[in-house]
Image (cartoon, helix red, strand yellow):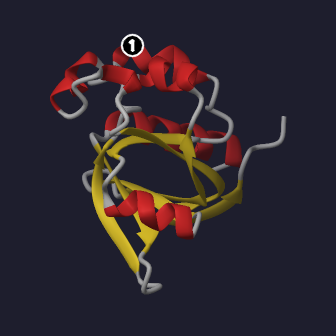
Amino acid sequence: MNIQTLHLANLNLMRQVKTGYLSTNGLDGYPQTRAMINIRHSEMFALLIPLFNQYDDCLTCYFHANTSSHKITQLTSNIKGNVCYSDFKSAHNLLLIGDLSIVTDQHLRTLFWQDRWTSFYPEGASDQSYTLIKLSPVKAKGSLGVQLFSYALPLPP
């Protein structure tokens, strides 16, 4: 399977699974992994599809979190992290490795905002508790069936 075909399969996996497993490094140096809502899921977040289309070549990931969560403290201390997406039925596993950052651009925070999050962040996209996390992957690795893969991101044009 060529890289372009594999990359498309990985992109489709990201659109189909409801959960991504985000890992940050704890202040003690050990990794800490937690399940996160996959806001790239094409059914649950259909209105975000056009926004995500611009990130297809690099598989950039976004997650929302409460500003007071441990992961925010961890990623400000160590930007290295990863996210894993898995579909056990098709034996497709994708690990995206890269740098984590907190999105401070209010326009982008508003573009990703979902009204259903008001139970977590009552003041909406401007709520100080609402944090948008970005993973800028530099590498994709994993398995599709019995085939292992690893390639650099973003893909060359």
Pick the front one: 109 or 90: 109
Q: Is 151 left or right of 89, judged from the image as shown?
A: right
Q: Can you tell which quarter of the image residue 98 is in?
A: bottom right
Q: Which residue is mark 1?
A: 47
Residue 2 is situated, as x and y percent measured from the top left of the image, at 69, 48
Q: Is residue 30 above or below residue 141?
A: below
Q: Please say whether residue 146 is visible from this viewpoint.
A: no
**In this view, 150 is above or below 119:** below
Residue 142, image x, y percentages: 50, 63
Q: Residue furthest left?
A: 119
In this picture, is 150 found above or below 112? below
Q: Is residue 120 left or right of residue 20?
A: left
Could you tell me which residue is drawn at 31 percent across and 21 percent down?
Answer: 124
**Going 62% across and 31% down the picture, which residue do you hit?**
55
Rendering coords of residue 20 (x, y %): 35, 50
Please state the horizontal and vertical placement of residue 96, each as a whole percent of the image: 54, 57
Extreme residue toward the right, this view: 157
Examine the rendering and report whether any part of residue 49 can be seen: yes
Q: Quadrant of the C terminus?
A: top right
Query: In this figure, what is the number of numbered marks?
Result: 1
Q: Callout 1: helix, strand or loop?
A: helix
Q: Amino acid at mark 1?
A: Leu
Measured along the vertical axis of the image, is residue 50 above or below residue 1?
Answer: above
What residue do we see at 52% from left, 14% from top? 50
From the viewer's side, name the closer residue of 97 and 89. Answer: 97
